[in-house]
Image (cartoon, rainbow, N blue to C red):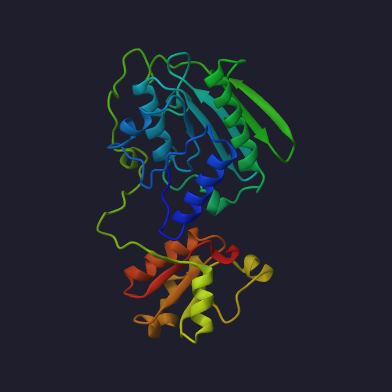
Amino acid sequence: LYRTSDVGRPKVEAAAERIEALNPDVKVDQYFLRLDSGNALEIFSEYDVIVDGTDNFPTRYLSNDACVLLGKPNVYGSIFRFDGQASVFDARRGPCYRCLFPEPPPPGSVPSCEEGGVLGVLPGLIATIQATETIKILTGLGRSLVGRLLIYDALSMEWTEFKLKKDPDCPVCGEHPTVTELIDYDGFCGVAPRSTDEPVVAQVSASEVAGRMKQGETLLLVDVRDSEELERAQIADSRWIPLAELDDRLSELEGWKDRPVVVHCHKGGRSARACERLMAAGFNQVENLDGGIEA
């Protein structure tokens, strides 16, 4: 399942082709849509194991509840800065995600990996554990992480294991469940739902921007990264306005409301939010540099 731009879609499709080429017994199904309460049960019903690689609380609770309702194992992984977590939630044999985290944290209290950062090797490490658990479930080999939570501290290179018990009062998998169908998970987690009427941020590739600049097109390149990132690398002739200062410095861009503006950060996440703010402020030709300065 991917939420990706038209620019990023060919990369995902190419990756799927490479995976299938490596092993002809593997078939990769791609869904270019947002997982929500209206489609989760239908999509999940086609598969034996759900591997949760998401990075936001609404989707984690949605995935958990859908797995409980369908009776499927949920291979869980989570990362932040220098720490990682992994487990297998299977309400048929043990606790579910809600048994461990009955309520989501207050909105904004837990920064995303984009905001707080993450050690680059950590996602691969936790994902490898998830892959291992998935293979064990499918083959029936070994002892799975059902009822156990692994905590990894990369700075101290320590693993800690916690025993998990099923909560009899769990609203989804408990003795008297109150959640018997999928709900509004954005509302449950206190996240404002994205309006379908909001304009979609246009994505542009690095090669396309380079080509347009080479042909002499006049465009403004806005860098919304932090000062530390600017010291490491920057694109010549770009305008530096950190994302945190953007709202207060919109007047500096006043002459570009009807002219092409390309916004970039490190990999494209913060710049997408900057594009949304610029569009809301009346900028009509805003594009997000897909892949950021990395690209």
Quarter of the figure that contains the C terminus: bottom right
Task: State whether residue 252 is above or below residue 268.
Answer: below
Direction right: furthest residue: 156
Tell me what residue is drawn at x 36 percent, y 75 percent: 285
Task: State whether residue 139 is above or below residue 112.
Answer: above
Would residue 1 be found to the left or right of residue 76 on screen? Answer: left
- Residue 45: x and y in percent read 35, 27
Q: Quadrant of residue 37?
A: top left
Q: Nearer the viewer, residue 139 or 179?
A: 139
Tell me what residue is drawn at x 39 percent, y 26 percent: 67
Quarter of the figure that contains the N terminus: top left
- Residue 42: x and y in percent read 31, 32
| Residue 171 seen from this side | no
Q: Quadrant of residue 177?
A: top left
Q: Quadrant of residue 280?
A: bottom left
| Residue 24 seen from this side | yes
Task: State whether residue 122 is above or below residue 199.
Answer: above
